[in-house]
C-alpha cells in the first residue's frame, strides 16, 4: 500500500511532466514501473516507504527538477495509508493515459494540467470525486469524454 506522501510524489512528478513534456520519453519506463507498483500494492496489500521515489531514483539526475526523488524520506507524522482501491484505479488510469499519449506533447500537457492535483485530492480530501471530475472536464471535452468516468464512479 502507498502512503499519502507517495501521492505527493506523484503530484510532483505530474507537475514536472506538465512543464517538461519533451522529457516524457526519459521517464516513460519509470511511469510503467509506477503503474506496476500501484497494481501490485492493491493485489498484495504490501508496499514499502518511498515506493514512488525508489522507482524514480535511477531515472533522475541531481541537476533536475526531480532531484527531490533522490532523497529517501523517513515519515514520522501524519502518515496515512492509502487503502481505497478506487484511488489506485484512478492513478493507474491517469498514468496509462500518459503512456498512451506521451508522444503527443500538446495532449500530454493538457492531461498533466488536468490531473496533476488529483493525487493531492486523494491524499487530503475526504470526498474527492466532484473536484476531480471538475479538474478533468477540459481534457474530456477536447480528447476523451469517458476519461476517468468509470474510475470516478467507484469513489
Image (cartoon, grey):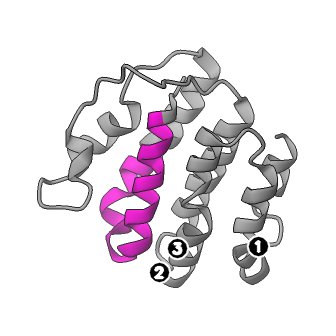
Q: Can residue 148 be seen?
A: no
Cα–Cα gap, marks 2 and 1: 19 Å
- Nearer to us in this view, 71 or 43: 71
User: Where the N terminus falls, by quadrant?
Assistant: top right
On screen, residue 12 versus residue 127, left or right, reads left
- State the mark number for residue 105: 2
Whether tag 2 and tag 3 are in contact, CB under 8 A, the answer is: yes
Q: Can residue 129 be seen?
A: yes
Who comes first in sequence, dot 1 or dot 3? 3
Can residue 59 be found in the magenta stretch? no
Q: How many marks?
A: 3
- Identify the residue at horizontal 82%, vertical 72% (top origin): 145
In the picture shown, does residue 61 fall above or below 106?
above
Q: Position of residue 114 (x, y in %)?
A: 62, 69
Q: Position of residue 129 (x, y in %)?
A: 79, 50
- Identify the residue at horizontal 55%, vertical 53% (top origin): 95
Q: Residues within 10 Å of mark 3 (few under 14, many from 20)?
A: many
Q: Which residue position holds label 3? A: 108
Q: Which residue position holds label 1? A: 137
Q: Position of residue 120 (x, y in %)?
A: 56, 48
Cα–Cα gap, marks 2 and 3: 5 Å
- Identify the residue at horizontal 37%, vertical 64% (top origin): 16
> Range of the magenta residues?
5-31
On screen, residue 60 versus residue 109, left or right, reads left
Amino acid at each position: 500500500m502507498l502512503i499519502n506522501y507517495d501521492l505527493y510524489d506523484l503530484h510532483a512528478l505530474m507537475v514536472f511532466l506538465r512543464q517538461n513534456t519533451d522529457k516524457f520519453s526519459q521517464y516513460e519506463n519509470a511511469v510503467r514501473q509506477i503503474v506496476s507498483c500501484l497494481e501490485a500494492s492493491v493485489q498484495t496489500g504490501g508496499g514499502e516507504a518511498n515506493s514512488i521515489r525508489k522507482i524514480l531514483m535511477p531515472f533522475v539526475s541531481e541537476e533536475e527538477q526531480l532531484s527531490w526523488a533522490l532523497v529517501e524520506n523517513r515519515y514520522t507524522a501524519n502518515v496515512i495509508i492509502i487503502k481505497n482501491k478506487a484511488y489506485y484505479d484512478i492513478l493507474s488510469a491517469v498514468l496509462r493515459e500518459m503512456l498512451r499519449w506521451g508522444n503527443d506533447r500538446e495532449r500530454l500537457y493538457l492531461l498533466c494540467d488536468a490531473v496533476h492535483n488529483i493525487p493531492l485530492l486523494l491524499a487530503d480530501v475526504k470526498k474527492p470525486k466532484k473536484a476531480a471530475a471538475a479538474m478533468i472536464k477540459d481534457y474530456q471535452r477536447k480528447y476523451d469524454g469517458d476519461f476517468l468516468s468509470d474510475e470516478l464512479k467507484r469513489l
